Image (cartoon, grey):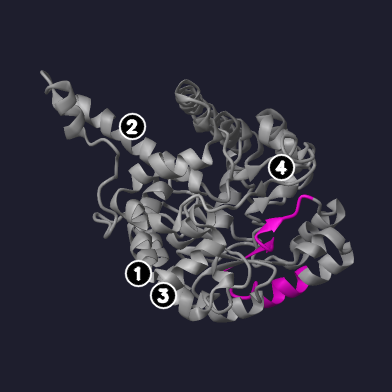
């Protein structure tokens, strides 16, 4: 299995780096079809063993895939805190229905100053009490909810670790990405202010929006690095939600500057990025040319023109996608075969392309269409069968990462030391774990704004 794992990982990494590879990788980032292959949508988010077994069953039937996504939801964490931002199958929705995001203005329009002045304090005192319904149940229950959340977070980390080990050692399957972050503007516009709120804010208080984005850039970079693969094998994931609603002027002013800075910090730390260009990014994707070559994998959504993307940025960044979601759901194997042939001929030329759908493989895809895609890649997607893919060495890490700054915390060590009345022994032995745990907790706060 080690050889198979390294072959798949090497193929994936070579395509990302725009280097020669034996064939076009089958590298769909979000494989909803696989995680629900032999499990219900409810089982995927509540029963880790059934979720893992479903994916292993998928790999058994579709061994040609080169990567397999990692689901980021384990619903019990959301249950113990009473998180309001998502509705889950089997709890709020029918067991077969997909997870749904529930948008609201969890940050008020007049709270920018509080967010900018002390981001961590704002999250604890303003944002989280509005998002966690368990914080409305009285102090004892609220405190106990946070205790349970800490335990649940440890359980989820073990679930994900076990899944990664099982898929690697038993199935030879790499991950598509590990770790995540948001563009600062999306962080504001998704869960904090909501789409309506943020679009009002860029007109009514644009300077506050820009200042908040500047404050959030290093916080998002830190979150990305804290959740990333320590071996730097996989890119870090970033979805993008608001660019498709923005004019080029709005994007260039409010979205891109802080997003670019965030990505530059992550790239300087030795990581690549897998960016979902959700909706139509056609007016914006030329900005990818401002980042180092091969540093970002660009998933093109159904609404985007992937052939234009290849023309505009395909010489500089790896492109993924090309099979519309509706074709997986409603099309025929013959249509899939014809589409893959065109994609291999027009997008595969010169490398730097990976086969996929519009950022994901729908849960209700026809199995015969998934099989048709795989078979078509095996027919039309080869470059050189004599090449033997091998994992690439990790990227170098910059000695200094401009703009990242120190890890933010809520209670600095000096405050804690004063509470203790000083320390009698080796201060470093006490300080280091204190600051490590403080940093982990600070980063955890922002996971609820995703």
Residue 359 among magenta residues: yes
Label 1 SS: helix
Q: CA distance from mark 1 to mark 2?
A: 34 Å
Is 282 left, or right, of 381 in this rendering? left
Pointer 2 residue: 437
Q: Are marks 1 and 2 in contact (CB under 8 Å)?
A: no
Q: Residues within 10 Å of mark 3 (few under 14, many from 20)?
A: some
Quarter of the figure that contains the N terminus: top right
Q: Nearer the viewer, mark 2 or mark 4?
A: 2
Location of residue 182 in the rendering, given as x and y in whole percent from the top left corner: 48, 56
Q: Position of residue 431 (x, y in %)?
A: 21, 29
Identify residue for label 1. 207
Q: Earlier in the sequence, mark 1 or mark 4?
A: 4
Q: Nearer the viewer, residue 394 or 390?
A: 394
Q: Quadrant location of residue 396?
A: bottom left
**Decide: marks 3, 2 in contact (CB < 8 A)?**
no
Q: Residue at x 43, y 59 (%)?
A: 184
Label 4: few (<14), some (14–19) or many (≥20) C-alpha neighbours in 10 Å: many
Instruction: List the residue tagged with mark 3.
Output: 253
x and y, in percent, of residue 416 in the image: 21, 29
Q: Is residue 405 above or below residue 153?
A: below
Disc 4, SS? helix
């Amino acid at each position: 299995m080690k050889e198979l794992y390294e072959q798949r990982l090497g193929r994936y990494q070579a395509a990302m780096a725009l280097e020669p590879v034996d064939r076009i990788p089958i590298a769909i980032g979000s494989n909803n079809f696989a995680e629900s292959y032999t499990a219900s949508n409810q089982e995927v988010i509540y029963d880790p063993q059934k979720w893992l077994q479903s994916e292993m069953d998928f790999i058994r039937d579709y061994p040609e895939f080169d990567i397999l996504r990692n689901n980021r939801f384990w619903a019990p964490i959301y249950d113990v805190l009473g998180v309001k931002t998502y509705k889950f199958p089997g709890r709020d929705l029918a067991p077969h229905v997909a997870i749904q995001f529930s948008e609201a203005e969890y940050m008020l329009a007049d709270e920018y100053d509080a967010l900018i002045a002390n981001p961590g304090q704002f999250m604890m005192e303003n944002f989280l009490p509005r998002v966690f319904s368990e914080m409305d149940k009285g102090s004892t229950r609220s405190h106990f909810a946070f205790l349970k959340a800490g335990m649940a977070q440890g359980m989820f980390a073990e679930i994900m670790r076990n899944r990664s080990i099982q898929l690697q050692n038993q199935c030879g399957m790499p991950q598509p990405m590990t770790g995540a972050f948001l563009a600062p503007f999306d962080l504001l516009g998704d869960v904090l202010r909501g789409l309506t709120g943020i679009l009002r804010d860029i007109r009514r208080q644009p300077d506050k929006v820009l200042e908040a984005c500047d404050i959030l850039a290093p916080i998002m970079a830190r979150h990305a690095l804290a959740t990333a693969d320590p071996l730097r094998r996989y890119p870090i994931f970033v979805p993008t939600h608001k660019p498709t609603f923005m004019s080029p002027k709005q994007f260039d002013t409010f979205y891109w500057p802080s997003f670019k800075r965030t990505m530059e910090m992550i790239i300087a730390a030795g990581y690549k990025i897998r960016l979902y260009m959700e909706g139509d990014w056609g007016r914006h994707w030329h900005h990818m040319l401002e980042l180092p070559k091969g540093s970002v994998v660009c998933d093109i959504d159904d609404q985007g023109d992937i052939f234009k993307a290849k023309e505009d940025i395909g010489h500089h960044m790896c492109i993924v996608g090309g099979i519309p979601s509706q074709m997986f759901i409603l099309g025929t194997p013959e249509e899939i075969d014809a589409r893959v042939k065109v994609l291999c001929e027009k997008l595969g030329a010169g490398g730097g392309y990976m086969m996929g759908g519009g950022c994901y493989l729908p849960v209700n895809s026809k199995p015969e269409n998934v099989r048709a895609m795989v078979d078509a890649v095996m027919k039309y997607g080869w470059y050189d069968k004599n090449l033997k893919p091998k994992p690439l060495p990790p990227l170098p890490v910059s000695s200094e990462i401009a703009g990242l700054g120190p890890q933010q915390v809520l209670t600095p060590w000096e405050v804690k030391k004063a509470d203790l009345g000083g320390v009698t022994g080796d201060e470093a032995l006490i300080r280091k774990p204190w600051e490590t745990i403080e940093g982990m907790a600070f980063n955890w706060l922002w996971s609820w704004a995703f």
